[in-house]
Amino acid sequence: MNEKQPFPQSQELQEHQRLHAGLVPEAAPRREPTSSMEEHAAYPAPERVTPDWRRLDVAVNRWGDRIAAGLSYAAENDTQIGRETARTIAHVLGRAFGRMSALAGYGRTGEGEYEQLRDEYLALAQGTETGWVKELVDTYGSYLVREKYPDVQTTTYMRQDHAKLEHLLVPTEVELDEQKYLVHVPGIYGRETIEDLTTTLAELQIDQDAALRAYLSLPDVSAVTGDVMVDFHSHFIGTYPSLEDAIYELSGVEDRIEEVHEYAAERHLIFDNISPDYEALAETMEAGFDIVEDDTGKRRVYAFYK
């Protein structure tokens, strides 16, 4: 790719660049630009394996104003990009792989298989150091993840609709011996990393470790870290016979009951029976603990620190 190729310097793009620099534009489009691209059925596979950077340069010069207007509109309205802007970005990125690519198909129809789209846009991001390419990939990829997984969790305290692709934890199935397990992987990782993760989990014998499976199933836990087992042991509290048993111990029910008895005794009152409100106690624990039921049908749960 011609690394000196600038992103089109339209007024809308200049506003977008100022926004990223912390400034607010004087005006933004009243509504998101609509696409005029002809719609066709999605195609199954890309024409090219190696991106055609020249075609990508040509496409961004043609469609850059529309993309910049959509970015400015999203920033002005404090939201993520809209569907038409996402389709336009996909159309531009798809030019690097040709009309048969998943990205090009999404540009035409607004539909496509997530895994195919992911592998194509990540290939673009990993194949260049050009800033605007990486930014378009991040913007479109983040939109796509949220579209497919509206409740996706993040690894940051930033608002979900503001989080970058690297912070979005995508629900991902890994398969071992025909058994599928749910884990969560940051959006910047594709097929190769997931295959490596599958190998790692097989070595850790995840199929025999229900507590590890419970931990990795949590939506705010990344399965791609420096050492999965170190993270697991730093968060694992223990195994309990039931949800009530876990709540009873972790919420300090015995201490609470003792405090009530002391309070009553000071006022010359006697309680015959005190029963925990497990539902209310569970709500008070949500900020500090995760409790996951066993996935083998056994009546036990696993508790973890947040």
Image (cartoon, helix red, strand yellow):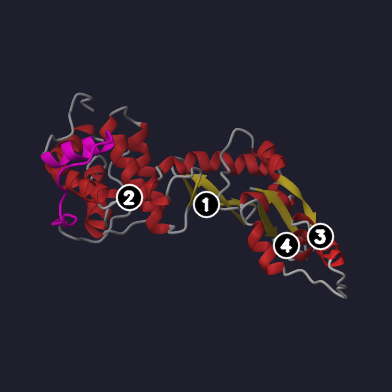
Q: Position of residue 252 (x, y in %)?
A: 78, 56
**Height in image: 215 above or below 296?**
above
- Which of the labelled discs sits on residue 45, or is there none? 2
Q: Nearer the viewer, mark 4 or mark 2?
A: 4
Query: As drawn, which residue projects farthest toward the top?
Result: 4
Q: Position of residue 234 (x, y in %)?
A: 70, 39
Which residue does the numbered mark 4 point to in the structure image? Answer: 296
Sequence-first tag of 4 and 2 = 2
Q: Nearer the viewer, mark 3 or mark 2?
A: 3
Q: Position of residue 31 (x, y in %)?
A: 17, 57
* Residue type marked 2: Ala
Which residue does the numbered mark 3 point to in the structure image? Answer: 259
Q: Is residue 241 magenta?
A: no
Sequence-first tag of 3 and 2 = 2
Q: Residues within 10 Å of mark 3 (few under 14, many from 20)?
A: few
Residue located at (24% from left, 37% from top):
23
What distance separates the C-alpha of mark 4 from that of mark 1?
20 Å
